[in-house]
Amino acid sequence: MSGISLKSHKFRLDREDDWKKLELLLGRLENRSIRSLTDAEMIALPALYRATLSSLSVARATSLDQDVIAYLESLSTRSYFAIYGNQTRMSTRLRHFFIIGWPQAVQNITRETIASALIMFLGALLAYVLVRNNMDWYFSFMPESLMGARTPASTALELRDTLYHDGDKSGLTEFASYLFSHNSRVAILAFALGFAFAIPSAALVLYNGCTLGAFVALFVDKGLGFELGGWLIIHGATELFAIVLAGAAGMKIGWTVAFPGKMSRMEAVGKAGAEAASVLGGVVIMLFLAGLLEGFGRQLITNDYVRYAIGLTTLGLWLAYFYMPRNFDTLELDDTAGTS
């Protein structure tokens, strides 16, 4: 035993300086950033890492002191993540998501987005025509909790009051809150159920369109179509767009499950899922912004033309943000800015 201890002591004495240098560099790298290292230290870091791996290999092969082996294993692991791990700052990741990741993911599902928008439009058109011809259809498309006091029996004055005044239990605040939570559930489910060959996603988008069409038909029947349009567009330009994108993301996954192409089904679904997840992450942000517009903009702004202006401007900004031509390869951000 004394011979092994002596051998271990000599082994550590010969190499300990390199281990301490590596540990010092790792400490600075972990506590600050890669910018805290000089060029010479950055060049030395991989060499010290390889030397430590070599020491670990020798220590294991010769059954040296277990404390030495544990120390070298810990040092090697820290070195691996410092050299090969992701050193991107959180701020860089967020900038990458908003500048590249999210708009690029949306552009990559343009075909599905068009399909989702058409399905919602067809659902709205179908419900609108049916309700306009027979108001009894209204109760088939509108959930009772979403309906509130807005029924075919309501007068034009009663319906108009819900567009401009907040106060009673069935007023704007309660309806706006329910509408936001309702559309959020639809968006998340449209994405989550996409794996079932996209059928549930398409059905949910269609249902949402039918609900919208029936609602519009009721107000148009009372001569309030223009007023309702302003009430809806100030938040709907963002919220409905988010639902369309969530449905498109679900369809992307479902289509890939059914037709994986040249890749294996698991590889194709994994790639599509990662892309769709980026879209859904942005959809959550859109729904949050829509909630702010819904909760404040519609209550504070009662002028129809201002409502239309805000809604159309918002829609134009979203379209420009997502679909403005750009070369994403030239927008790559610096990922070596250091740890967060």
Image (cartoon, rainbow, N blue to C red):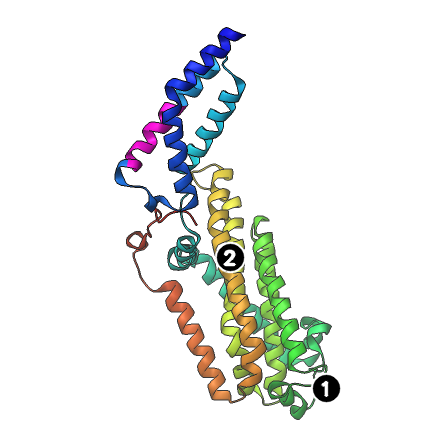
- Residue in the picture at 59% in, 73% down: 212
Quadrant of the snapshot with the N terminus? top right
- Residue in the picture at 40% in, 73% down: 316
Of the pair 118 and 323, the residue shown nearer to us: 323
Q: Is residue 272 magenta?
A: no
Say which residue label 1 marks. 153
Q: Position of residue 42 (x, y in %)?
A: 30, 37
Q: Is residue 128 above or below residue 204?
A: below
Give me the C-alpha separation between circle 1 and circle 2.
Answer: 41 Å
Question: Visible in this render: residue 195?
Answer: yes
Say which residue label 2 marks. 281
The part of the image, by quadrant, that contains residue 107 is bottom left
The three-letter amino acid code for the residue at tag 1 is Ala
Q: Residues within 10 Å of mark 1 (few under 14, many from 20)?
A: few
Of the pair 183 and 251, the residue shown nearer to us: 183
Q: Is residue 289 above or below residue 2?
A: below
Q: Give the extent of the magenta segment.
A: 41-52
Numbered label attached to residue 234:
none
The kind of secondary structure the magenta stretch mainly shows is: helix
Q: Position of residue 206 (x, y in %)?
A: 58, 64
Q: Is residue 43 magenta?
A: yes
- Please report whichever mark, 1 or 2, sits nearer to the chain's N-terminal start: 1
The three-letter amino acid code for the residue at tag 2 is Gly
- In what element is the residue under mark 1? loop
- Residue in the picture at 60% in, 64% down: 184
